[in-house]
């Protein structure tokens, strides 16, 4: 398997659209790296440049130490799995999996052996002689994975491979891809707009916005220590709450809803009075108790809607026009329209600069 390095890679489409700005990162050997971000942030373009399907405007891409800028896709030793996996409808599962290998003149016996192994890994053995139309959506996606696995490439590229599946199948296939990574020890570059997929699959996650990398980190670091308000608001379901407040004294934040005194060491002490901040707090750190009377270090909020999830509930509050969500036990007794004082786990507060979103 292989390391993939993108050095200051930039992509400007002929119409002048800058899709990717200065992408500079090494994907380690055997790493599962996920690119995540909203639609149009440049994920697919980045992946397609690694695949060789899209020309690079500047910078270099190397795979296993070799610069591949000028190499056509088929010479790059990569295999790609797309959202639209487009199996050949008139070929059986086995023929679909064999097709790419035949084109490369792989010896027949080796083709048989590789298909046998891949079918075993993916649970496709009973279906080898079926046509794609005789398979479920999940089975078809598995065949598409099989087609990539039999190639034994240096690098796997996945472009939103699960987006066409229903919710249940998506979870199943996600687990399958996870297991596959453990088993194949492969270097994987995986694109998704779904932060849950990113969090559950990635060894590291690259959060992108407007063609730029906003943060690269492992899932736990990304969740606990977002580098900016964009990453904070993109990762997590529900995402981190962000409330505009003002520093009124060292370590003391205030807004119309109340005053918070940050514990020592939280960083707030260095901020000058008068500075505007975005106060970030995860839904689980809005404490699972809300008060009918004011106390120190609380924020007054109005209950908007309650989303019952069974094991937990999301209670959405409003402070002015900002929505704050608390992750609570399912039996939290509040109703729409009630006013409550919220207690926050103050040491979990993260502060961001509202001018540029950077962590303070
Ligand atoms: P993502 O995969 O994150 O949704 P893309 O990489 O597809 O984003 O697109 C990044 C940006 O480049 C978008 O603004 C998109 O409109 C633009 N773009 C993508 N493909 C082309 C193209 N062939 N020509 C011009 N602009 C494009």
Image (cartoon, rainbow, N blue to C red):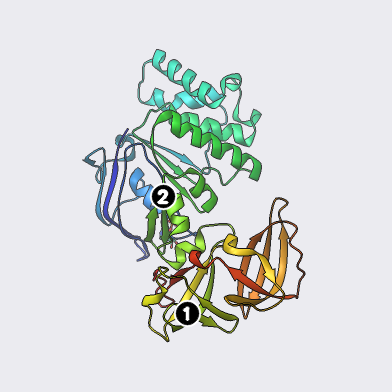
User: Residue 213, position in %: x, y?
Assistant: 37, 59
Some atom of ligand 1 lies within 8 Å of the CB belonging to the residue at label 2: no
SS type, badge 1 = strand
User: Residue 214, position in %: x, y?
Assistant: 39, 61
Residue at horizontal 75 percent and vertical 67 percent from the top: 334
Where is mark 2, residue-wise? Answer: 218
On the rendered structure, is 217 left or right of 180? left
Q: Distance between the residues labelled 2 and 1?
A: 31 Å
Indicate whether 29 appears above or below 262: above
Some atom of ligand 1 lies within 8 Å of the CB belonging to the residue at label 1: no
Q: Nearer the viewer, residue 317 or 150?
A: 317
User: Residue 2, position in %: x, y?
Assistant: 30, 36
Where is mark 1, residue-wise? Answer: 252
On the rendered structure, is 274 left or right of 299? left
Mark drawn on residue 184: none
Q: Which residue lies furthest to the left in this view?
A: 66
């Amino acid at each position: 398997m292989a390391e993939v390095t993108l050095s200051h890679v930039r992509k400007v489409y002929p119409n002048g659209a800058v899709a990717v700005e200065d992408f500079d990162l090494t994907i380690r050997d055997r790493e599962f790296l996920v690119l995540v971000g909203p639609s149009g942030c440049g994920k697919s373009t980045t992946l397609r440049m690694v695949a060789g399907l899209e020309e690079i405007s500047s910078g270099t891409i190397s795979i296993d130490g070799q610069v591949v800028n000028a190499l056509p896709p088929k010479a790059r030793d990569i295999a790609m799995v797309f959202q639209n996996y487009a199996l050949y409808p008139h070929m059986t599962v086995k023929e679909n999996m064999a097709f790419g290998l035949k084109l490369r003149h792989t010896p027949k016996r080796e083709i048989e052996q590789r298909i046998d192994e891949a079918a075993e890994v993916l649970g496709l053995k009973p279906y080898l002689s079926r046509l794609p139309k005789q398979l479920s959506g999940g089975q078809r996606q598995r065949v598409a994975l099989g087609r990539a696995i039999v190639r034994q490439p240096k690098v796997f590229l996945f472009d939103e491979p699960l987006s066409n599946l229903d919710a249940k199948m998506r979870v199943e296939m996600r687990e399958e891809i996870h297991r596959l990574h453990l088993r194949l020890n492969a270097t994987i570059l995986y694109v998704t707009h779904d932060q849950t997929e990113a969090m559950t699959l990635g060894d590291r996650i690259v959060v992108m916005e407007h063609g730029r990398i906003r943060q690269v980190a492992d899932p736990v670091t990304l969740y606990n220590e977002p580098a900016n308000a964009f990453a904070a608001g993109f990762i997590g379901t529900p995402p981190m709450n962000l409330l505009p407040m003002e520093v009124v004294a060292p370590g003391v934040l205030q807004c119309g809803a109340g005053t918070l005194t940050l514990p020592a060491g939280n960083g707030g002490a260095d901020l000058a009075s008068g500075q505007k901040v975005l106060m970030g707090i995860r839904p689980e750190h809005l404490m699972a108790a809300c008060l009918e009377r004011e106390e120190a270090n609380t924020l007054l909020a109005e209950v908007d809607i309650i989303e019952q999830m069974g094991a937990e509930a999301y209670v959405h509050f409003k402070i002015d026009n900002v929505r704050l969500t608390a992750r609570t036990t399912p039996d939290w007794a509040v109703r729409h329209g009630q006013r409550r004082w919220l207690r926050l786990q103050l040491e979990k507060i993260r502060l961001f600069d509202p001018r540029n979103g950077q962590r303070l």
